[in-house]
Image (tube, rainbow, N blue to C red):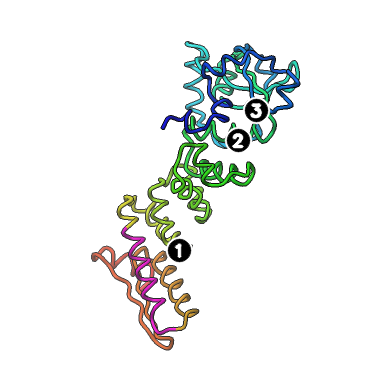
Amino acid sequence: MSKKKALGRGLSALLSDTPEDEKLDVDVTSPVREKENKVVTDSINEILLTEIETNPFQPRQHFDQEALKELSESIKVHGIIQPITVRKFSNNQYQLISGERRFQASKLAGLTKIPAYVRTADDQQMLEMALIENIQRENLNPIEISLSYQRLISECNLKQEELGDRVGKSRSTVTNYLRLLKLPPDIQIAMRDNKLTMGHARAIINVENPDSQLYIFKKTLAEDLSVRKVEELARELTSTTKETTTSNTPQSQAKEVTQLQTRLSSHFGTKVSVKSDGKKGDIRIPFLSIEDLNRILDILKV
């Protein structure tokens, strides 16, 4: 399924530069068109950069400065190949809908004008257009995509099925992205900074306990674990948690034992086993080698 088709007829008209768009030979200031809240395109205009303000609905919060410099150098040589898209406020005031990287790079390149398609849209259309345009065309990190999906659902009143149709993704894919927002903040930040992949995060989120999630996360970064290793570790922790929960100890005590086990595992950097019948029990700290034993002894200070 192509991106343009996936967006549906309405949003395809909003976002694409198709021959159908070019047939809309309508004055962008037409009150009839504005009343209908339709998005129309005029011929490409050369607009002063000083007359354009950035989009407050821009979902991307972080721009790679080195990549912007490279794009700026390319613009100096080749110019703007793909026009940006703006909406018109007044005769000399525009707001960016899409193309912020091109807009920022053009300023770095010293341009005073930039080619742009001029469209009309209300605030909700602006938000929906900006979010979907970025999801489809920009290399957003998983957290930025998740936040964009969440905003489309909450602020544009879209259901998950409708959202999937808009962005050309299955409902399960949308759900997997939205689940990422339930992860602890430290893990979300690592994904935002490209220190953790989507595959790692999907394995971690299968573990329900936040402490266990953080333990796997820290171990993943410290030991540069593969996605498969993280999946195995998640299964082991989930299995251990189930064994502890289904023992003869009271449920509240079983939860405390599980939390203690997770904290000790994180502290010693190895899978610590804690067993208790409510009155007595044992703690086992495995080691893989003499060097690993010495490391644990150093932590114990013995």
Give the overall secondary structure of the magenta segment.
Answer: helix
Q: Nearer the viewer, residue 145 or 156?
A: 156
- Taking the view exactly as shown, the residue that stands out farthest to the left is 289
Amino acid at pointer 1: Glu
Quadrant of image for the N terminus: top left
Sequence order check, earlier mark of 2 and 3 = 3
Query: Callout 2: helix, strand or loop?
Result: helix
Amino acid at pointer 2: Glu
Q: Nearer the viewer, mark 2 or mark 1?
A: 2
Few, some or many residues within 10 Å of mark 2 (<14, 14–19, 20+)? many
Q: Nearer the viewer, residue 25 or 58?
A: 25
Q: Which mark is residue 208?
A: 1
**Disc 3 and disc 1: Cα gap in Å?**
40 Å
Residue 149, visible in the rendered structure: yes
Residue 20: where, in percent of width, then height?
A: 54, 18
Residue 149: where, in percent of width, then height?
A: 54, 43
Magenta-colored stretch includes residue 247: yes
Q: Is residue 22 above or below residue 275?
A: above
Residue 223: where, in percent of width, then height?
A: 34, 53
Q: Which residue is mark 3?
A: 54
Q: Is residue 127 above or below residue 97?
A: below
Q: Quadrant of residue 296?
A: bottom left
The part of the chain drawn in magenta is 232-249
Amino acid at pointer 3: Thr
Q: Which residue is mark 2?
A: 128
- The residue that appears at 39% across and 87% down in the rendered structure is 280
Residue 84: where, in percent of width, then height?
A: 57, 20
Sequence order check, earlier mark of 2 and 1 = 2
